């Protein structure tokens, strides 16, 4: 008969490790994002709609 407890615990531990790996990766990415210098944003004007209708 299969050892269901052993199977369950093996799967549970692997799932927990996978979740912890994802959490650590997310935290690392958040730190990278926070520590990046702020990007300068520019406003690009749109062409006038009246000019578009003439063409």
Image: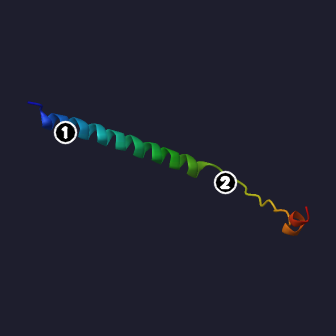
Percent position of residue 17, x then y: 32, 39
Q: Nearer the viewer, residue 51 or 20?
A: 51
Q: Residue at 86% across / 66% down in the picture? A: 48
Quadrant containing the N terminus is top left
Q: Is residue 48 above or below residue 14?
A: below
Mark 2 sits on what residue? 38
Percent position of residue 8, x then y: 19, 39
Q: Residue at 35% across / 44% down in the picture? A: 19
Q: Is residue 8 left or right of residue 24?
A: left
Q: Quadrant of residue 12?
A: top left
Q: Nearer the viewer, residue 1 or 10?
A: 1
Q: What is the residue that sits farthest to the left in this orientation?
A: 1
Q: Residue at 87% across / 66% down in the picture? A: 53
Q: What is the residue that sits farthest to the top in this orientation?
A: 1
Q: Is residue 42 above or below residue 14?
A: below
Quadrant containing the C terminus is bottom right
Q: Quadrant of residue 42?
A: bottom right
Q: Which mark is residue 8?
A: 1
């Amino acid at each position: 008969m299969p050892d269901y407890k052993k199977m369950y615990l093996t799967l549970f531990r692997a799932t927990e490790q996978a979740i912890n790996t994802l959490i650590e990766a997310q935290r690392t990415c958040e730190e990278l994002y926070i520590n990046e210098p702020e990007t300068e944003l520019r406003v690009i004007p749109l062409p006038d709609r009246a000019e578009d209708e003439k063409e």
